[in-house]
Image: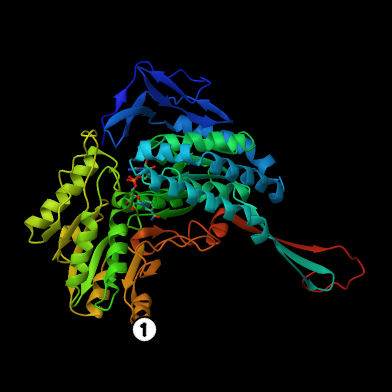
Amino acid sequence: MPTIVRSKNPTPRGAATVAKPTNGIQTVMNFANGKWVASHSTDYLPVMDPSIGQQIANVPLSTPQDVDDAVRSAQKAFPEWSSTPIKERVQVFYRYKTLFERHAEELAALVHQENGKTMSESMAEVEKSVEVTEFACSMPQLVAGEILEVSRSVECRIDRVPLGVVVSITPFNFPNMVPNWTIPNALVLGNTMILKPSEQVPLSALRIAELLKEAGLPDGVFNIVHGGQAAVEAICDHPGIQAISFVGSTRVAKAVYVRATSHLKRALCLGGAKNHLIVLPDAHEEMTATNVAASMSGCAGQRCMAASAMVAVGAVDHIVKRLCDEARKIVPGKSLGAVISKSAKERIERYITEAERDGAKVLVDGRNAVVEGKEEGYYVGPTVIDYVRPDMKIAQEEVFGPVLSITRAETVDEAISIENSSPYGNAASVYTQSGGLANYVVERASAGMIGVNIGVPVPREPFSFGGWNESKFGSGDITGKSSIEFWTKLKKTTTKWNPEAKVNWMS
Ligand code: NAD
């Protein structure tokens, strides 16, 4: 955790810019009523560029007063926005999508700067934001209500109505995409929102707010509160907030779910992951090796869908060897980005060292990676560790770095039981050329998203995203059609206009 800086001279409240330089470093602002506002806090954290290890901004640790200001802004905007017809609301998001496409390079550069992932990975993240926005634009087609004459002259109709003020709390690993998992869907459906971005990557959220405003979103419909634990707890406790979606680690997801629901809020909290890839002896060598290597190293392994545990079944040494060859081709600073912080780099390297000490064999070693010209950057090279036993810490915990641990199994049933014993359940994959064996694993794997010869089995819209077990708390999924349930409630209206119709017990 970086040191908190207590500023004697915080950015003045009400300043009209996104960020005001303090000693050359910008201080990010909260966003409410369509304006940039400084936090009431005097506590700030540094925001770092992980590729070069240099500070690029300060972020305020917002207070309960800041949360309350944002709630008031969103409450004020709700009556007008929620009563705007959905076909009008969606127009804002057609324009938002166009603006996103127009500014894609710049948005990707911002992700690269604050998160450290490569430019091509950053661009892919922006493209995914466009895809979820396209899905949101199809909402009018998906949420038409139902109507039926249920007895003579009596009709019942069902409408989906928004919840009110909702909150989206997001992690560091996708500063652009994860906020957009929730913003377009929740707002098109008529809610007003507060985004609480990760304090490690607050900058993309600022550009999102600017583009929403440029797209014509009315003031107060979208708001931002920066900060960490104190802001999140104030959000969970605030009586003016109806629903909270959360994406982050399992420890915090659980705490937020418990606290939010204890205040009778609707909550959907996505947590961490330990995704198992089961490789069978008949798997296609090249396809499997390149796919697994890409899955474990993409976004420096900081994806909740990353392959982190491979279960090698039977005679697959040829695939392990090829996988190591592929991993060695991945170059930190070029095809592999930085991890988020110095402490993340130290944590990841500690996992590797402990696994080696406990008897595992490091086949490809990414410790002590240094990138020329970016010596202060937080890099960990691709790492493959063989002969990891299921009881080792590295086999059980989320490492969240470009590290693949391989556990050997004799049979497919043993491999499935290793996968099933993980407390997580985000994703799992099987590599085989046999449809029957693939199906056998798909039916038995205990995860919400399953891949067959695919290492990152992210469902694309309109299919929904969400794991099982300790990877998600709450019902339904966060994207796709499932998100409609989360962001709306049903209003059932029964109507009779014809006085001549006979009265029966229901009329
Ligand atoms: P994190 O849990 O540390 O932080 C997530 C959010 O919670 C941030 O906005 C942060 O400010 C806030 N927060 C942090 N500590 C808190 C506390 N004690 N109380 C209240 N709020 C707190 O997660 P992270 O490190 O930013 O992100 C990485 C994690 O997110 C990984 O575990 C990864 O697997 C997970 N993740 C999951 C998914 C998914 O879809 N399941 C997607 C992306 C990331």
> Which residue, as the protein is rendered here, is positioned at the far right?
500
Callout count: 1
Q: Nearer the viewer, residue 226 or 179?
A: 179
**Which residue: 25% across, 80% down?**
413
Q: Pinpoint residue 128: horizontal percent, then vertical percent.
A: 48, 51
Q: On the picture, is 208 further left or further right than 414?
A: right
**Which residue: 34% across, 44% down?**
117
Q: Residues within 10 Å of mark 1 (few under 14, many from 20)?
A: few
Q: On the picture, is 381 further left or further right than 122?
A: left
Q: Nearer the viewer, residue 308 or 152?
A: 308
Q: Nearer the viewer, residue 502 or 410?
A: 410
Q: Quadrant of residue 202?
A: top left
Q: Pinpoint residue 364: horizontal percent, then vertical percent.
A: 16, 56
**SS type, badge 1:** helix
Residue type, numbered disc 1? Gly
Q: Pinpoint residue 118: horizontal percent, then vertical percent.
A: 35, 44
Above or below — where is 501 with respect to 78? below
Q: Can residue 409 be seen in this snapshot?
A: yes
Per the image, the residue denoted by label 1 is: 436
Q: Nearer the viewer, residue 462 or 259?
A: 462
User: Which quadrant: the C terminus?
Assistant: bottom right
Q: Quadrant of residue 74?
A: top right
Q: Pinpoint residue 376: horizontal percent, then vertical percent.
A: 22, 33
